[in-house]
Image (spheres, coloured by chain):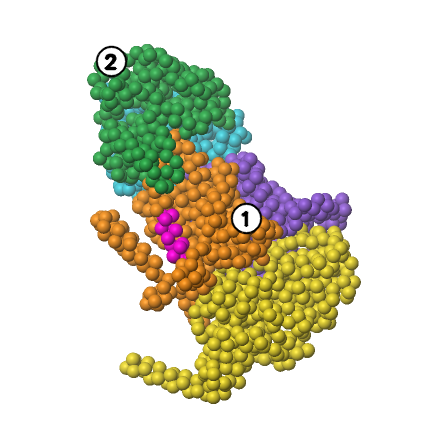
Amino acid sequence: MLLEIDDVSLLYGRIQALHGISLTVDEGEIVALIGANGAGKSTTMRAISGIRPIATGSIRFEGEDISKLRADLRVRRGLCQAPEGRGIFPGMTVLENLDMGAYTRRDRAGVAQDLARVLDLFPRLAERRKQPGGTLSGGEQQMLAVGRALMSRPKLLLLDEPSMGLAPMLIQQIFDIVTEINEQGTTVLLVEQNAQQALARAHRAYVLETGRIVKSGTGAELLHDPAVKEAYLGVA
Amino acid sequence: MDFDGLFSNFGELTTTGLTQGAIYALVALGYTLVYGVLRLINFAHSEVFIAGAFAAIWTWNGFGLDQNSQVSGIGSVLFYLLVAMIVAAIASAGTATVIERVAYRPLRKRNAPPLAFLITAIGASIAISEAFGIYTRRLPEGAPSLVSSKPLFHVFGVPIDAVQLLTIGAALLMMVLLDLFINRSRTGRGIRAVAQDANTAALMGVNKDRIILMVFIAGGSMAGVAGLLYDVRIQTLTYSVGFLLGLKAFTAAVLGGIGNLRGALIGGLLLGVVENYASGLFGSQWKDFAAFAVLVVLLMFRPTGLLGESLGRARA
Amino acid sequence: MSDTEQTPAVPAQAGAPAVEAVPDREPLLEVDNVTLRFGGVVALNNVDFTLYKGEILGLIGPNGAGKTTCFNAMTGIYQPTEGQIRFRGEKISGKKRHEITQLGMARTFQNIRLFPEMTALENVQVGADAHHKTSVISALFRLPRHRREEREGREKAERLLEFVGIRHRMHEFSRNLSYGEQRRLEIARALATDPVLLCLDEPAAGFNPAEKEELLQLIRQIRDTGVTVLLIEHDMRLVMGVTDRIVVLEFGKKIAEGLPAEVRDNPKVVAAYLGVPDNAA
Amino acid sequence: MRQKLARVIGGVAMVALVAGGTACSSGSDTASGGDACGSKIAFFGALTGSSAALGINENNGVKLAVDKYNKENADCKVELVSLDSQGSPDQAPGLAQKAIDDTKILGVVGPAYSGESEAAGPLFNEAGLVSITASATRPSLADQKWKTFFRAVGNDFSQGPAAGNYMKNVLKADKVYVIDDQSAYGAGLADEVKKVLGPAVVGSDKVQGEGKQTEFSGVVTKVKAANVKAIFYGGYYQEAGLIRKQLTAAGVTAPLVAGDGVNDGAYITSAGQAAAEGTILTCPCQPAAEARGTFVQEYKALNGSEPGTYSDTAYDAANIMLAGIKAGKSTREGLLEFVKGYSGEGVAASYKFTENGELDPAQVKVWAFKVTGGKVVPDQEIPKS
Amino acid sequence: MTTVLERVRSGREAAGERWRGAPRWVRWVLLAAVIAFFYALPNKEFYQYLGPIPTPGANFTQVMFTVSIYVLLAVGLNIVVGFAGLLDLGYFGFFAVGAYTVAVLTSPSSNIKTLWPWLLVVPLAIALTMLSGVMLGTPTLRLRGDYLAIVTLGFAEMIRIAAVSSDFLKGQRGFNQIPHPPGKYADGKPFFGVLDARPYYWLVLTLIIMVVIGVRNLTHSRVGRAWISIREDEDAAQLMGVPTFKFKLWAFASGAAIAGLAGALFAGKQNFVNSQNFELLNSIIILAAVIFGGSGNIVGAIVGGGLVAYMIERFRGIELFGVELYEYRFLIFGLVLVIMMIFRPEGLIPNRRRAAEFKDRRKEVIVGE
């Protein structure tokens, strides 16, 4: 078990955003977290990466309880998130942004290798490597965010809405890359609005609703679950 | 208004203004760095400057130099300057670190609102300044005259002396070093990352506490060097001078666009020159008035300063 | 499944217009070829649509499609780079935000923006104050006019809290309300400004189906009191259930406009909004 | 047990008091009784804060006077109360009231500065509490019809013209630059100097006092460009030292002439010996050799430091009051009358007051001092015109 | 430490609850008792029984006058900082405007020699201060947060320099013989004399009560709601139809008016006004006082302003291990500010709303920090 979340609750001020969430991610999996806007998907991600404190419950990574660990130390443990809304450093060039992904790493050779790999995955980024992140288009920023997360060579990659604001072609591309990354050995936890794509690619998935997990199963199961279809795919 | 006073002394007012401005700029960097990363006016930064300035004087005293000593020989002068500079930088960086630890970090741990930070900053500033005042019995301390201010050469008839060269040169050198540090080093990249988006930076594995510490150390060292240059130039130090100088330096930082390193330099130099022109034009008593008037007017037309805000956003 | 025709909604106030879904086609808000750029990013690209009096218009699109940006342009937060927006025939750009509100446009926020340190009642009173004339002087000395307006404002606020169903919580600080209550409070506060047009920005985000159902009823009731509603929403069921017409944005562009049924069957919309099925791009 | 002890001690104290009282009364006239013993005089001035040096000088002078008096009259001591005003007019009324409330306080030496004198004067006047200032030289203080105001030094009208005359006649300066610190004292002095020198003043500038300004490049530049024979500074030693230092550093060699506010050892420390050399300091007082007798030695023995500016005048002011107490004036009215009619010699001057409390102009002597070899040495007495 | 603090906190909360729970008449009686206490305070016959409360180093009545002026200023600044959330670091500048208006128009040493009576000038001083508030606010209130802070600081410093350096404002020479407020005892002696500070104190105390009632009326109205909504979320306030700029200007102007009143009272009592009265440090002390007491709460501001002014004077005349504590008062003041903010950032008597917010904020600390 790579990641194990047990009965996690989280508060925003006095509003409870998560009510006892439990989920697991196994090594080598793609796990998707789907749900409507405001259901608590991104909040879950923030709790895992340590940007928000949890009120109760525990988060274990490779068997170690990391619930009280500082966010940057979680990154050092091999847990890296490409945040929602991309979180590009607008004043840094594409290369510098990618370098930030490798901030915790000291092996120069490995970093260079990964940089080559990322630029290979995203040729657009290679073209714009000297350009400040703020001037990229939405899709390019999304690629940069994913590429940057990869630069830390994470054991578990957390992707928060990688398809947001992207044209269909690009969505396709991003998901292809997610699959490819996964095949290369990175475990992925994916939060998606685009349930169709997410479920199609994921090994397993959880459905969140108002801060609770209401359903879970394999991607295929959920993809064909009529209730899920109606609620999140808009298909009556 | 004394236009004659302004024009006949234009050259010298400019050079002395630039010299003073260089000191403002170095102190302004500290404000700008901390503001860029924490969005906090580090009100106590003026005391960081004073700590360095006193440290330099006390170092010289330790070598048996007082305000009446004459030092000759370029070698020994350089030695004294260098030693005092290192001590001053360490003292200032240390003071800044202590302020961060004692006054700011506990508040960050409690997620206190910005106003609370401002008040602790003011409290720390008053307390440190008073501590120096009580220790020195509120009397001025003299520094030896290490560098001669006899004119070395003339440019367009304006005499340039060694103190001016040293001050402006050292300030520029420190600026370049800081610029390199921020833009080239790994820590510098961390600083810019935290300044632009602290949460995302944490997601990249940046330790915010460590970065904040580095920012205080970097800003503190700059202030320490500024303290040394101040000693060399003015040769006397009173515990209370930090307040106004700090205020001016902050003004300089805002003028240039707070959070913007190059803005701090430009703001500092501009402020030094403008207030000197004003003292030529209206009389020295209106010098500070002019400095603040420039700030107010500028902010009305360019609400984020000359070069605009933010560390890193405009490529630092 | 056009729910609109079969609404049994009880009008909250007397004199509500007929429940007939056909709008009287009097334009209320005209978005006229609006383009908006931030730095290098084009957030809105030549968006063009009209909102008619009395209707509920849905503005939909995937996350990041520019819906909220469009909203912000309409409420005067952003100035369009090109094109213009007219509300009740008047140009929006150049108007101060509170003037736009006083002109009759009110909104809620995607990420709730109440005044957390005010009670629920006070929050709504702030909205009601939009049409009050009390001066500082009359407030200072508690002159009769101030007291009258204060009483009226309070009564109105209580009525609206009753309307959205959280009157029993009116003395709580808004930050202490539950998520659903906060969403309702935002609507009450917006209604307190006596809007002609109410803009709701993802009011159902974070709601469970039962809560969504209640919201649906509430939106209909609001429309039935004569208020035109612009609704940004993700939840297709909600949008399909309540709107008269739908505008679809994607990637800052309008890709479709029409009746809910038409929109739902539009292949472009299906592709963009519902997600591209694997191996179908 | 404890209570008993307290009672015993109290009893002893009472006896001592009564004994002291009778001992004293035997030596003085019977009318005002023996309760002049155990009375107090107050010193009023800055003892902390940025303008404390002057106040400390004066307080030490008063301390010496009281100390000497108590040694000579061991059976009838007088107590000194020091009130720290920080030189701020804000604080002055509260402290003045404090002095007034204490009915044992018969007279006040001070207030030291003109500003606080303005604020405290009306209270003293109302309460009939006599005050002799040893250093507040603003002329207008004497014009406010305060019955209780006395000044043990000449005002700015005496010192200013003298300084001007010195520059004109002794230094033969035909070009003078005048700087002041905008303080009541400094600006007043500078105005008088300007009046005397007339067209010889080729430029003037103002700086900020009270330690607010340390960087004088603007002034220095202008002085340098004016190429003058002498520079006059109206203000206090702290800024004077800095200005002198920065002027010398910039290569200006013309001598600095300043008033008694700069006449303090701290000036030389602040300017540095080399730069301070040759500075002319005027003072409406006489040099030690003239009349000071053993004052300097005694002052040093008591306070451990050299007397500074106004230490002597404060000493004299205190002695005037002590003479009154010695003469048995045990009420405020009595002491006030005594001071009004006083005439006698002090270490700094001879004292006699005019109708509105000024030092009799005939008694005002202005001397010029010169910084030589790191010390302030007397130069010459300046004739009044 | 924490437990003591917790106990103090819970005790205070309990007291607050009891206060709110008490019947109306009980509250009125208590309030009347407190007010009566403060009216009685400067009488020697009363305060001599109060043990360590009277200041040993200065006349207590005079100190109480200073304290009351600070309280008035704190109440005024609380409108600007506490309610409208505008960080004003130069508030004391308005005090200076008020005091100088009185000085210039009444003092015989003024250039214009109008020699008007004090009472006539007071409304003028308030009006002029309000006007200066509007003049400062109009261009600067578009700036936000820290920029506003530095600009107000700059303005206050400009006022001070103008006071020091301009001929018209007489600099350090100042204005003397400023008239006192009118009023005579039966025997013809002036009520507001030179020696007795009590009438001045009573006057300020009465005005404080009136001002507090006025401020309360404002905060319980549309105006107060507008201020708080601006503080909470300026954008949302605008979108709810609040003319934010107008109300920010009103906050500035009302705050300024109160400072102007304080300045006029000060000048009338002090008899003498010069540039030394207006140090920048005063602005900072008052801001600290408001935050210290509990910004956004009128009672908090009163307590903060009173305590800070009183504490600074209280150190006078105390010797500890042979050193006069007065010398250390600002050192102690600075340290108290730091410690206070760390352990109680919401202030001594926070607004109920604020207290809850701070509690929640503490829970939301980022992990590991």
Residue stretch in magenta: E200-212
Residue at 44% x, 20% y: name it: C90
Name the spot of residue A41 as percent of width and height, x first.
32, 31
- The colour applied to the residues of chain C in this rendering is green
- The residue depicted at 64 percent of the width and 64 percent of the height is D156
Q: Give the chain letter for orange.
A: E
The color chain B is rendered in: purple
Name the residue located 48 percent from the left edge and 49 percent from the top edge. E120
| Camera sees residue B85 | no
Q: Secondary structure at mark 1?
A: helix
Q: Which label number is shown at residue C5?
A: 2
What percent of the width, then of the height, locates residue E112? 58, 50
Task: Bin the neighbour count of mark 2 within 10 Å (Cα to Cα): few under 14, some 14-19, many 20 and up.
Answer: few
Tell me which amino acid carries mark 2.
Answer: Glu
Marked residue chain, label 2? C
Where is mark 1, residue-wise? Answer: E159
Mark 2–mark 1 distance (CA, rounded to whole Å): 69 Å
A185 magenta-colored? no
Chain (yellow): D
Q: Is residue C40 at all visible to an observer of this figure?
A: yes
Mark 1: which amino acid?
A: Ile
Left or right, D184 with reference to D70: right
Which chain, by letter, is cyan? A
